[in-house]
Image (cartoon, helix red, strand yellow):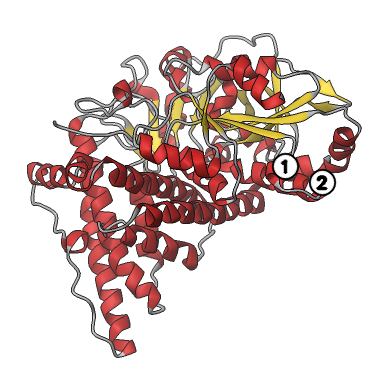
Amino acid sequence: MSMYCYQCEQTSRGVACTNLGVCGKDEPTAVLQDLLVEAVKGIAMYAHRAAKLGAQDQQIDLAVVENLFATVTNVDFDPQRLVDHLRQAAQMRDKAKRLYEDACRRAGSTPEQLSGPAAWQPANDLEGLLAQGRQVSIANRQARLGADVTGLQELILYGLKGAAAYADHACILGAYVPQVFAAFHEILDFLTHDGTSTDQLLATALNVGQLNLKVMALLDDAHTSAFGHPQPTKVRITPVRGKAIVVSGHDLKDLEELLKQTDGKGINVYTHGEMLPAHGYPGLKKFPHLVGNYGGAWQDQRREFDDFPGAILMTTNCIQKPKESYIKRIFTTGLVAWPGVRHIGRDRNFAPVIEAALAAPGFAQDEPEKSIMVGFGHHAVLGLAEKVVQAVKQGVIRRFFLIGGCDGAKPGRDYYTQLAEMVPRDCVILTLACGKYRFNKLDFGQIDGIPRLLDIGQCNDAYSAIQIALALADAFQCTVNELPLSLVLSWYEQKAVAILLTLLHLGIRNIRIGPSLPAFITPGVLQVLVDKFHLTPISTPEADLKAILG
């Protein structure tokens, strides 16, 4: 077995990718990512002990979340970049060790002699690193610990990876809270101990959910402080004449910098995928050359980017293997990387992207205008709270459906389109993340002036959905579980895992999830989640809707 990866919903045959990842990740990339996770655990072992003694270092903390984020699905496919991450991780581990030892000296205590990930030293060449990576593979742990324990460890790790992605976005906007990073270190250190019980593992998984809630709150505050509260906004979804750049991913700071650098250059900027909600932020929609959204969710990009007559910028996870037809006009930035694709560094000098856009033909003419609505974050929706509550009390609104999450290419996701179309006309649909592309261009109409489809934003904006649910529960003086609210979620990668753990941490039950269950959740672990949280796999739209509506 050359690789073993089952961290995303695309997992080959529902078990694991063992040769080539369905995402396009090859064996060296997968193995180096496994080793990078091990290296991050080594940093955390020292950083956790240092933090308990009151010592933290922002550079060390950021290295932990950045390196975790680099291993999220569809982020970094470049083995050389991963080797660079590994070298940097070893340096950060040494720095964390010095931080811990200095803290011990100040406290008058003797430092622990740590082994395992804390003692790892990078091999001198690629083959040596690959050999090290194979020694710490998931398959090796399964053989040692069993599938249930390993699966629960991976559930915790994948939740941390998702939370790390959100923490990285927040840090880019200046939101750094040491206590949050201390929690990352503590949980990563926990994962280095093999003799943990199922109860301890489940409790730690819920702790990840609690940590992710704090991180999402930080990110929400960072976004709104930098760009204002999202406002309901009409977004054009058909092209306009002129030179063009399309921006995909999640990072709003990258988009802002590109908009500044393209101002006055005669280039129209389009969002793609999870960037769609950017149009609702006052600080971004003020740029007149942010003209609309192009295409749909990430899994359609190879066809859509092939047709796009301009430059393409990938800011976070979501990249697929570029076609030769556009590989010279696609660029990566941040932690995203693909071999042979030009990378824009931390200085965000997007001059090469702009040059590629000016050299490309652009759109020859305007297409007939079509639009959709975005911008229904918690600030906007809670502004309608009194009207919404009255509509529910009067029986005008019967129920709320949160239908959202990640989209993907695997068959079975038409379920979410069918379910949204079948939701009764007296019900409101909340949606977020790229799963909304399954139905967000359909006309759902209104209920007493309230749109029946409310787009809350990115997967990053799950915090908004939680705040809306908590506010409605407060208004009705009940728990979230007693609200006329049903959650039907689609998952794809590790940020969805983090959000699910947050919902479970909050005690939210009766969540339906699909299109398939995670391969790392064994039947035994699934039964625990079903018994404790009433977590339910989706079935058919008809059967699920009948069960929900009673």
Residue occupied by mark 2: 476
Q: Is residue 387 above or below residue 505?
A: above
Left or right relative to 408: residue 442: right
Mark 1 secondary-structure assignment: helix
Q: Position of residue 217 (x, y in %)?
A: 60, 53
Given the image, on which type of amino acid does mark 2 rest? Phe
* Residue in the picture at 54% in, 20% down: 296
Of the image marks 2 and 1, the number of the one nearer the N terminus: 2
Left or right relative to 40: residue 317: right
Q: Is residue 521 visible?
A: no
Left or right relative to 194: residue 1: left
* Residue in the picture at 42% in, 56% down: 204
Q: Position of residue 194 (x, y in %)?
A: 25, 56
Q: Is residue 80 visible?
A: yes
Which quarter of the rendered picture does the N terminus lie within? top left
Given the image, on which type of amino acid does mark 1 rest? Glu
Which quarter of the rendered picture does the C terminus lie within? top right
